[in-house]
Image (cartoon, helix red, strand yellow):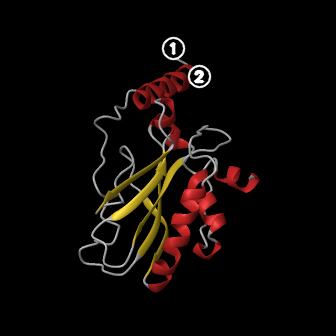
Amino acid sequence: MVNLKTIGLLACLVCVTACSSSDWRTANREPAGIAPNPMLTKEAVIEVYAADAFSWRGWFAVHTWIAFKPRDAAEYEVYEVVGWRVDSGNPAVRHYQTPTPDRYWYGARPEKVLSITGAKAQRLIPEVIAAINRYPWANEYSVFPGPNSNTFPAWIGLQVPELELKMPFNAIGAGYADES
C-alpha cells in the first residue's frame, strides 16, 4: 500500500522534473500584445514589464525589464540585465531595439508594472537614459541578493523618482538597489 508521503514525494519529483526539462530555446518569445504599437502610438512611452523567471525559478521570482520610446519613434529601446551575458564575458545590461518590447520571457507572459505616456514620458526619457548609463553593476550579476535583473529597474526607479516605480513583491534582488 502506498502512503501519502510517497505520493507527495512522487508528485514533487514529477513537477521538478517537468520544470527542469523546459527548453529555453523553444520557449515562447512572441509579443504579448500589451505594449502600445509604435506605428500607431506616436506619443512617448516608458514601460516596465515583469514576467515569471524561467523554469522553477518562476515559482518564486520574476524577471523585469524597462522599455521606452521617444515621441514618433518606430521602435522601443529595451534594457534588461541578464546573468548569462556575464558568464560569457559580456556586460550584464542588454540593450536592443524592437517594435514589441512586451515579449514573453521564455514562456512566461509579461505584465506591465509601469506605464507612462505623453509629455511626462518624453520629459523623463533623458533622465532614464542618464540613469542607465550610470548603473553601477553593469558588469555584475548575482541571483541573490543581487545585483540581478530586478536590481536594474529598481535602481533606475530610485534615480528617477518621478517614475513612481513600484516593483513587484517577488522581484527578488530589487532591494539590493536600496543598499547602494
Identify the residue at horizontal 56%, vertical 24% (top origin). 4
- Left or right? Give the position of 23 relative to 113: left
Q: Say what amino acid the circle numbered 1 marks.
A: Met
Q: 98 or 90, which is in the foreground?
A: 90
Q: Position of residue 147 (x, y in %)?
A: 63, 44
Q: Position of residue 5 (x, y in %)?
A: 59, 22
Residue positioned most to the left: 39
74 left or right, relative to 141: left
Q: Nearer the viewer, mark 1 or mark 2?
A: 2
Question: Few, some or many C-alpha atoms within 10 Å of disc 1 (few <14, some 14-19, many ≥20)?
Answer: few
Report the residue that reaches farthest toward the top. 1
Is 174 in front, or is 4?
Answer: 174
What amino acid is found at the position of numbered circle 2 in the picture? Lys
Q: Residues within 10 Å of mark 2 (few under 14, many from 20)?
A: few
Element under label 2?
Answer: helix
The label shown at residue 5 is 2
Quarter assignment of residue 43: bottom left
Point 50% across, 43% down: residue: 58
Cα separation, mark 1 vs mark 2, equals 12 Å
Q: Is residue 32 visible?
A: yes
Tag count in the figure?
2
> From the viewer's perspective, is residue 178 above or below residue 149?
below
Label 1: which residue? 1
Disc 1 is placed on an element classified as loop
Q: Give residue 148's position: percent from left, percent from top.
A: 58, 44
